[in-house]
Image: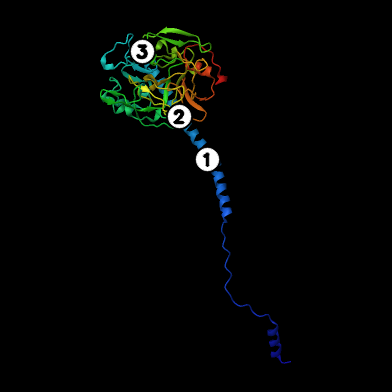
Amino acid sequence: MHPHSRIDKRRAEAPPSLPITSSPQRARVAFTLVELLVVIAIIGVLVGLLLPAVQAAREASRRMSCSNNLRQIGLAAHNYHSAYQRLPSGYVSYATRDGSAPAAVRMDAVTWDAGPGWGWAAGLLPFAEGNTVIENLRLDQPIWSAANQQAIATTLPMFLCPSASGGDAPFVVRDSSGNPLVVEGRQVQLGRSHYVASHGQESCWGECGAAATGEVFTNIYTSTTTIVSIHGDAGNVADGPFFRNSKTKFRDVLDGTSNTLFFGEHSSALSEKTWVGVVPGAFTHPRFRSPENGPDAAATLTLVHAGPSGGELDITGNPIIHPVNFPTYHVGQMFAEHLGGGNVCMGDGSIRFVTDFVDLFLWAELSSMNEHEVINWEKF
């Protein structure tokens, strides 16, 4: 056979070559609508799980900042006592036993509150972060004097709780009707505070003025009352460390400083408080209403009490004791916006977190400084 014939035969038996074409395109990848909705739902669930944790972490930080503020206040109070051998007055008022006073102090005919009005927090400024502010205050003049108009409206971070939602800005003092109080032709604007001082179980606001006597509770367990002479001296009624013209010494705290409330929270979401002091004729108004709350006299711009107090009875006839966040929502009680309770500063400078479910009698016992109650901390 001819050699070329074998080559031609192999060529004929070989498979035909494939045509040269471009490589096929890769298939397009995409989510279906159902898959997209599932992914969105999963992301939503994860965010829902993480958000409470983030909020809890932020609130824990705010609560810590608040407790640090109270710690600084307590330390300043101890330094004040070291310097003057007493604590600052709840607020300073012209002292009178018969309601007479010079016209310049603008004595309130009902409460007997009068100038100069400087409160406990203003007294602590030289021992805290307020040194710059204290240089601009004329403490020899009443709060409302023109020389103090700008300084008393100062915002001081030490007196602001980051959890309080009612605002940090200065506020205008109001009269009994809720209208701006005008003194010497000017409205009075005060720097805000979210912290208050304890007047004790009893309150001595409006009833500690012209009335010569007042009914007060003397036994929180039996609700028995007694009549005491007031004559303008709130110290005849108050059983806590801070009241009008108080000059409390640590030795006066017979129940022990570690067993006595000194300072605590009052968020501006409930009512407005100030670090400055008390303006005669002013009233504190609740920013939301409840069956039990209403406006109260000027002393509640800086002070609160625990109850019971003269005439305070609930609908069942029992004495009203109102700890932190108690649903009476008095402008004269402590109120905080932390989850589950609020911070307080004891007389020894220690900070405690009081839950919304604290025992009522324990709260009253801790609020008085000289009632000789036996404290059972297991009920805290």
Vertical placement of residue 106 versus 60, above or below: above
Is residue 129 visible to us here? Answer: no
In the rendered image, residue 220, in percent from the top left (x then y), is placed at: 51, 13
Quarter of the image for the N terminus: give it. bottom right
Which residue is rendered at x = 45% and y = 11% of the image? Answer: 216
> Marks 2 and 3: which is nearer the front?
3
Name the kind of residue labelled 3 in the image: Gly
In the rendered image, residue 233, in percent from the top left (x then y), is placed at: 37, 11
Name the kind of residue labelled 1 in the image: Leu
Q: Is residue 77 left or right of residue 23?
A: left
Q: CA distance from mark 2 to mark 3?
A: 35 Å
What colour scheme has been applied to the protein in the rendered image? Answer: rainbow
> Marks 1 and 3: which is nearer the front?
3
Is residue 202 visible to us here? Answer: yes
Q: Is residue 153 left or right of residue 217?
A: left
Residue indicated by mark 3 = 209
Labelled pair 1, 2 in contact (Cβ < 8 Å): no
Could you say which disc has been placed on residue 66 in the image?
2
Could you say which disc has been placed on residue 51 in the image?
1
Count neighbours of disc 2 (C-alpha within 10 A) and say few if under 14, some if 14 to 19, many if 20 or more.
many
Mark 1 or mark 2, earlier in chain: 1
Residue at the right extreme of this rendering: 1
Vertical placement of residue 270 versus 107, above or below: below
Name the kind of residue labelled 2 in the image: Cys
